[in-house]
Amino acid sequence: MEPFAKTHDYPIGVVIPTYNRIDTLLICLKHLEVQTWKDFEVIVVDDGSMDSTAQVMKEYQAQAPFPFRFLTQPNGGPARARNRAIRELNATACLLLGDDIFASPDLVRLHCEHHRSHPETNAAAVGLTRWSAEGQTVTPFMRWLDRDGAQFAYGDLLRGVSPSWEHFYTSNLSLKTDQLRRHPFDERFRWAAMEDIELGYRLAIEKELVMSFLPDAVAEHLHPTSFRQACRRMVGLGASAHLLGEIWPEHRIKSVSPIKLKLRSLLQQAWVLARLTDAADLLTHICVPNPLMERVLSLHSTLGYQQAAQRANSSSLPTP
């Protein structure tokens, strides 16, 4: 592969935000050490970790086998952490990875080749992320989440669906660095939920996004996820969906009929939702997917949305 025109020191740089995952982060970096493409830099931003991340990363920086920088910031979320690294990056293209993502040996090369073949500013590429078989037991529920569930839709991409802003997954995604500087992540998203989708949508409506899918740019994801953990995540996703709707009103949840609203309110009462969650958890060990599982996940998402709406309404009320 020929090099990019020399507008930056590196053709591609890797950006990794991290929070309290030093053991997993070290495995992530080990996979970058054995990439077949060697001409890249790495920036890790510690988003206010309370474990040994800072100490271990400073030691790693002293002997890293590739150009490596370690930055720190007070806890502000992955959007702010990525923006910080992108401002510092000295590479034409930016590859966004998670700290629990393990790159296959050709991953950096494939992203780099894509941007060499597509020098346009609006070119973006999403690779294939799948569950790691090491360090966790991949359950049928996790496979559903990854393929067709509430978390990712890689199944659609593998079936030939054209990628769009809805597949703007920062676990394994690359864009031009200058594009990300002009269109940074919205730092109002304080957690890892929909901050990437919001940017993808923003770029798409501004005609600044042409997505490609790189099925051979494979990364493995180490993040054991039970049904109950997914329910908790859905509450956060619901809160992020509310923020997305505040930013882009066309994405607000449409009003529902009074009867449906009353039924949903009943189902979301703490004791009712707890029992539904118990039942769905048991059923998920037997059959995946199942209607109750999907309904309970949806209820947790709606609960998060409504809680965020209540907080927003309370903060907007005038003080007496």
Image: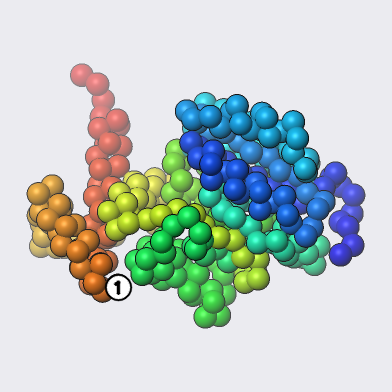
Residue 279's quadrant in the figure? bottom left
In the image, 104 versus 19, the foreground residue is 104
Which residue is found at the position 84% from the left and 45% from the top?
8
In the rendered image, the quadrant that contains the C terminus is top left
Q: Give the image location of residue 61, x and y in percent.
A: 71, 33
Residue 277's quadrant in the figure? bottom left
Q: Report whether 289 appears left or right of 199.
A: left
Q: How many numbered tags mark residues here?
A: 1
Q: Residue furthest bottom?
A: 159
Q: Give the image location of residue 268, x and y in percent.
A: 15, 52
Query: For the residue labelled by badge 1, is the local secondary structure a helix, a strand or a loop?
Result: loop
Badge 1: residue crowd in 10 Å (few <14, some 14–19, many ≥20): some
Which residue is found at the position 11% from the left and 60% from the top?
263
In the image, 209 versus 174, the foreground residue is 174
Q: Report whether 78 appears left or right of 34.
A: left
Tell me if residue 12 can be seen. yes
Q: Report whether 64 appears left or right of 305.
A: right
In the rendered image, the quadrant that contains the N terminus is bottom right
Q: Give the image location of residue 5, x and y in percent.
A: 89, 54
Residue 160's quadrant in the figure? bottom right
Q: Amino acid at mark 1?
A: Pro
- For label 1, the residue is 289
Tell me if residue 112 can be seen. no
Which residue is found at the position 53% from the left and 50% from the top?
100
Compared with 99, 292 (above or below) is below
Compared with 247, 208 (above or below) is below
Which residue is found at the position 52% from the left and 80% from the top?
159
Q: Report whether 77 appears left or right of 309.
A: right
Q: Give the image location of residue 95, x and y in percent.
A: 67, 52
